[in-house]
Image (spheres, rainbow, N blue to C red):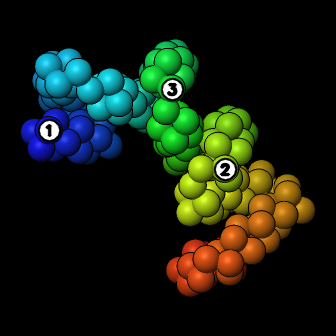
Amino acid sequence: TIRLKATIDLVAELAIAQDSVSLDQYLERGSQLSDQLNDNQSRIKIQLAKGFFYSYSSHKEDANPIYARLIAESRLLGDSIFLASIHEEIGKILVNNLQYTEALKYFHVALPIYEVLDIRKTMDVLLGIDGCYWYLREYSKSLFYARKGLRIADSLGAVEMKARFRNT
């Protein structure tokens, strides 16, 4: 599993670097390792890097079918936290690609799952939603989500997150 984790990390770095030749090689390697270990979550994470690669390339339109397939596969696993994390990661990719309206759709799916199952991850998603609305110049919505995140950060004593919400 250490080799698989290293491969996932390497695939993500190659996607960022837009190294398509090496990326294809390690996508295949990672897929084989995850199949050998029967690790569906890792296989999905590896394919997420492929969507990330397309999001930053001249083939942006090829990313959306990948994301749709990964979400469908994540639902089949029955792990709500993992499903929320895939939505969150896709949202972050879209934010980095300046697709704020599209990112909000993914963040808003992750939010209610995290609100029930992982309050700390809720803050991360609220920060993403707050930022999207701010960039879209929907300041009242941005402020609403920032205040919601700040209340959670206050209740948990999460000083770093409080500072991040106060700086938005």
Task: Say above or below: 111 vs 42.
Answer: below
Do labels 3 and 1 touch, CB within 8 Å?
no
Q: Which amino acid, mark 3? A: Gly
**Cα–Cα gap, marks 2 and 3:** 16 Å
Task: Name the quadrant containing residue 1.
Answer: top left
Element at label 2: helix
N-terminal label among 3 and 1 = 1
Q: Mark 3 points at which residue?
A: 78
Q: Name the residue under label 1.
A: 1
Q: Name the residue under label 2.
A: 116
Image coordinates of residue 102 in percent, x first then y, are: 68, 35
In-front residue for pair 11/2: 2
- Relative to residue 62, is residue 113 drawn left or right? right
Image label count: 3
In-front residue for pair 58/148: 148
Q: Which amino acid, mark 2? A: Val
Element at label 1: loop
Image coordinates of residue 156 in percent, x first then y, are: 61, 77
In-front residue for pair 75/117: 117
- Relative to residue 33, is residue 147 drawn left or right? right
